[in-house]
Image: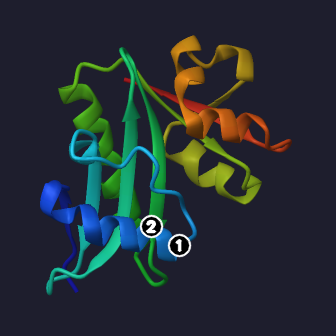
Amino acid sequence: MQALIRRANKQDLGSLRAFLSRANLGTDGLTDETIDYFLLLENEEGTLKGSLGMEAFTEFGLLRSLVVTPGQAEKEIFVLFDQMVQLAKEKGMKGLFLATNKSVALPFFELMGFQRVDREDIPSEFYQSEHIRHVLNVDNSIFLKFSL
């Protein structure tokens, strides 16, 4: 089955919010203005099978909303990340960060080129993010950075 990755648009807001909600992820910050910082993974019929979003700051992006339905190939997830890197470069960013509390995901992210960083190394402007403030309250959260 051929998968398609494309940038989300305003018409995708409802279906993306529903998709993220079904995965028990928040949709705060998903607006008409931020939707073009989200990528969608769809099957040939146009059914949403995955997403990856970025909260944009001056020089850095914070990855969020990574969701894929069971059965998606690892290759498709790699391509999703690769396309997000291209989007970040297009937007003039210097790096991408992500936060996770799932240590089992670390080998995957490290394979993608992310490196662990201390909380003190995340950009100060990230503290404006509701998402980051929430993550900072989770004891076992881990931050990773990908330099562009």
Q: Check the image and report above or below for 64 versus 18.
A: above
- Position of residue 70 measured from the top left corner of the image (x, y, whole percent): 49, 82
Q: Quadrant of the C terminus?
A: top left
The colour scheme used to paint the residues is rainbow
Q: Amino acid at mark 1?
A: Ala
Instruction: Locate residue 123 relative to residue 62 in the image: left or right.
Output: right
Q: Which mark is residue 23?
A: 1
Is residue 34 or residue 102 the one in the foreground?
Answer: 34
Point out the image quarter for the N terminus: bottom left
With 142 as the anchor, is 79 left or right in this view? left
At 58% across and 40% down in the image, what residue appears?
131
Looking at the picture, does residue 17 appear above or below residue 134? Answer: below
Q: Which residue is mark 2?
A: 20
Locate residue 65 relative to residue 36 in the image: left or right: right
Residue at 52 percent across and 15 percent down: it is 125
Residues at discs 1 and 2 in contact (Cβ within 8 Å): yes
- Residue 14 image position (x, y, % from top left): 27, 68
Find residue 58 and report its horizontal and vertical position in percent: 36, 15
Q: Is residue 59 above or below residue 17?
A: above
Badge count: 2
* SS label for mark 2: helix
CA gap, disc 1 to disc 2? 5 Å
The quarter of the picture where residue 25 lies is bottom right
Between 94 and 62, the one lying in front of the other is 62
Q: Position of residue 72 (x, y in %)?
A: 41, 78
Secondary-structure class at tag 1: loop
Name the residue rendered at 22%, 25% in the picture.
Answer: 91
